[in-house]
Amino acid sequence: MNDELRSYVAEARWFGGKGRDWELTSVRRVGELPGAPDGLRVTIELAEVVYGGDADTELYQLPLAYYQQPQDRIGHALIGEWHDDELGQAYVYDAVHDRESMALWLRAFAAADPVAGGAGPGELMFHRLPGHEFDLEAHSTLFSGEQSNSSVAFGEDSLMKVFRKVTPGVNPDVAIHQVLTEAGSTHVAALYGWLDLVDDEAEGTYSTIQLAMLQQFLRTASDGWDLALASVRNLFAEADLHADEVGGDFAGEAARLGVALAEVHDDLAEHFPLEQRDAAVVDDLATAMEQRLTAAIDVVPDLAVHEASLRATYAALRELDHIDVQQVHGDLHLGQTLRTSKGWKIVDFEGEPAKPLAERLKPDSAWRDVAGMMRSFDYAPRVVALTSGGYDAEESDQRAYRAAEWSARNRTAFLDAYTNRRGVEADRTARVLLDAYLADKVVYEAVYEARNRPGWLSIPLAALGETR
């Protein structure tokens, strides 16, 4: 069994250990979905992965469907065959591909008591917020493009995100969606429910692990990144027009997105703690950025020519005597936004996936989110210019100029709308913070591109050659 599960985990899109030496050290069943018909068991299992050398450990959630008979309709999701204590020899599938199994999850959410307390040790607890009636006849559809989790739509009614890599503690995606939903925010998909496990594995102590969340399905929404790329292509197709003259001008959308982020930040500031961090914490932040730069230069030697200006940016940050922090998104870019007929929605509040959960739960400066979105506005036109190809040097130079024009126009529209809506001035303190977060983000991008898409390394490097 473990060999088959190991092969399955190794090939999964959501497995974060690719390229590392690892072992599947244990698989344990932590729950079973009620109401399964004869010949089917649907379980939730936790797989422990230990990495060689540093003894780093991760837990991955495996929703499994055990069938007494083979199921040709989901043959592509077969993991293996092994003995089950109730069914005997069983055919085991990844349950998120199976409509019969997913229907059990949906019915469990619908049956949850909106006012119930927490689960007991070793129990699953489905939670539901009041106010939404579930469509229990809706068929499930697995989203194929998901990377770090598994998302399943139920008709046009709801969307379930199954967290694959799980950690004891509160998942910020659940916590933030709950607060914003209950606050009546129009800029997020409404939260309908979530699934907790109270894990009793750890020597008599109990830790809650959040396994899934169910939310509003924004069926007609358009991806913000795709809309931005379409706008850039429209600009490039009109060789004699400027960004503000073409029909696909994006500045209005950028401004509306700035307002949406400002209102989300205001709601988060109202319902989560606001803190002021002193000079010592500011110094630690600047030091961490400097250390990331030092490590990045080893990976991307081309950063060395920009080292002095980057360190000057971090030195200016160190001169601040405090910073204000609050709950933020933590990993914001155009790909985390959806445009609906009723406006912009911001999604995926899990924070930066590579960071430990404890780090993702910490408050941060709101300017981190602003910087992430501004870098995304810079990326979109440069990606189109870089990947369209087939142009001579003069045409390529023109595209680079027009990409910079699109980027500057939309970054300005976004930032002005954000600051005006929040009633904050882009004063020296704000500018120093924004410059530092922008610089840190560009350094991160350079390392990412060098390791994953070397052909795109010119994008963050170009940003360092301009005024950010």
Image (cartoon, rainbow, N blue to C red):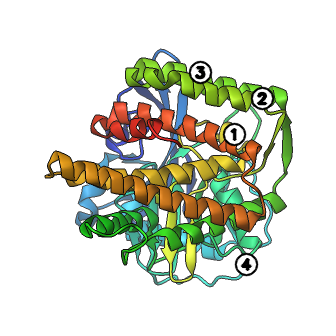
x and y percentages locating residue 174 in the rendered image: 66, 58
Tags 1 and 3 in contact by the CB under 8 Å rule? no
Q: CA distance from mark 3 to mark 2?
A: 17 Å
Snapshot quadrant of residue 216: bottom right
Pick whichever of labels 1 and 4 is earlier in the sequence: 4
Mark positioned earlier in the residue sequence (2 or 1): 2
Which residue carries the number 4 mark?
130
Is label 1 in a helix, a strand or a loop? helix
Whole-angstrom CA distance, mark 1 to mark 3, is 18 Å
CB under 8 Å between discs 2 and 1: yes
Q: Residues within 10 Å of mark 1 (few under 14, many from 20)?
A: many
Q: Is there CB contact under 8 Å for labels 3 and 4?
A: no
Three-letter code, disc 3: Gln
Instruction: Looking at this view, name the residue that lies furthest to the top.
Output: 53
Check disc 4 and report its element: helix, strand or loop: loop
- Mark 1 or mark 4: which is in front? 1
Residue matched to label 1: 432
Q: Residue type at mark 2: give it.
A: Glu
Residue tagged 3:
291
Residue picked out by circle 2: 319
- Disc 2 is placed on an element classified as loop
Counting residues from the N terminus, which is met first, the one under dot 3 or under dot 4? 4
Name the residue at 46% across, 40% down: 466
Disc 3 from disc 4: Cα separation: 47 Å
For the residue marked with disc 1, what is the amino acid?
Answer: Val
Which mark's residue is nearer the viewer, 4 or 2?
2
Q: Which numbered mark, 3 or 4, is in the foreground of this view? A: 3
Give the quadrant of residue 199: top right
Choose the circle earlier in sequence order: 1 or 3. Answer: 3
Q: Quadrant of the N terminus?
A: top left
